[in-house]
Amino acid sequence: MSEARAERLAALVAEEGLDALIVGDLVNPGDSGPDAIANVRWLTGFAGTSGLAIVGPERREFLTDFRYAELAERRVGDAFERVIFDGPVFEELGRRLRGRVGFDPAATSVRNHRKLAAAVGDDVELVAAEGLVERLRRVKDADEVDAIAAASRLADEALEWLLERGIAGKTERRIAFELETRMRELGAQPSFPTIVASGPNGALPHAIPTDREVGPNELVTIDWGAKLDGYCSDGTRTFATGELDEELRSAYELVLRAQLAGVDAVAAGAHGREVDAVSRGIIEEAGMGERFGHGLGHGVGLQVHEPPRLSKRSEDTLEPGNVVTVEPGVYVPGRFGIRIEDLVVVTAGEPKNLSGLPKELRVVS
Ligand code: ZN
Ligand code: ZN
């Protein structure tokens, strides 16, 4: 796996006229979180907190420190020359790099770029090369799609478990806690902090769960995801806790119509802006365009938010193997919010929806 990926990356590196590319987190090397290590993980299989790779047409090196020597042997294997370094990481890089060397400006800091430049000296030309690994990561192979599908199934199962036990009368924080605990019991972890937004709180798209108790006859939006074997899921459902007034019901139907049309528009060759416009157009026609202030969707994989994007400003065109969310919403401040989100695989034919839960308005007590 890692050999084939390294090969493809090396070809890109050569195309960019580089002798080598530094892959990994140069902001906090040695203390990288899961997002910061995602490129290294994709490339090498290594998922610890200290890992950098150097990839070029003729070289595959993986650098870590003593703490991860054994993990590196198990996960990275022999596709890379494994280097266990002792001492400042930039000095180690300085000893190894020659020629034109790419670094990702999005994965370093001003301070650390200075340190790197000082360490490599005048023999090395440091060249900004942004997003090369991300470009490859956006097309998922079959194993990756399976991993995301498994995370999504687990997340659905956890939500069903929660709904069977009821949400009315519980605080948003309690609901988020129970759902996250259930995902952990099933062997995963939350892929991001769960959003539970009830009644007027629903108008905050990225609401943080509060001590508000979920009341009767209102809407509750739950946006949750599981992370399983490194891969994320992301989904949203909005539920009713009883009879709703006409305004809320028709707003729900509107978001659902926009969501279904958006999913149908997900196709190889479609532009991220076009897919966004399909859902957005339906909401705008209903006079609610102002109430849908975020993009329609984003890629999901090792990270919960990654390219490609579906939005008004997207520069992306969809390809088979992309996995994207479709998540239109309507948010009315002080009143309510609605969002429905599925996880969809782009294929050469019909889009494949990984989200298994029904989307008709569901009443839960
Ligand atoms: Zn979400
Ligand atoms: Zn999302």
Image (cartoon, grey):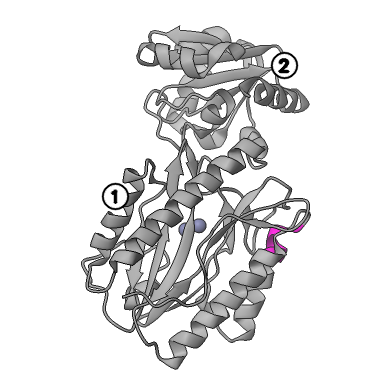
Where is residue 85, by image quadrant? top left
State the residue in front, 18 or 76.
Answer: 76
Secondary structure beneath label 1: helix
Q: Which of marks 1 and 2 is in front?
A: 1
Where is residue 100, by image quadrant? top right
In the depicted structure, whether residue 137 falls above or below residue 7 = below
Q: Main SS of the magenta segment? A: helix
In the depicted structure, whether residue 239 falls above or below residue 181 = below
Numbered tag placed on residue 57 in the rendering:
2
Quadrant placement of the C terminus: bottom left
Give the image location of residue 245, x and y in percent. 40, 91
Q: How crowded is mark 2: few (under 14 residues within 10 Å), some or many (20 or more)?
A: some
Magenta stretch in the rendered image = 270-275
- Which amino acid, mark 1? Thr
**Label 2 C-beta lies within 8 Å of the nearest ligand 2 atom:** no
Q: In this view, does 225 lie to the left or right of 278?
A: left
State yes or no: residue 272 in magenta.
yes
Residue at point 45%, 92% (across, down): 246
State the residue in front, 70 or 89.
Answer: 70
State yes or no: residue 204 in magenta.
no
Give the image location of residue 334, x and y in percent. 35, 81
Numbered tag placed on residue 181 in the rendering:
1
Q: Can residue 134 be seen in this view?
A: no
Give the image location of residue 229, x and y in percent. 47, 35
First-in-chain label (1 vs 2) = 2
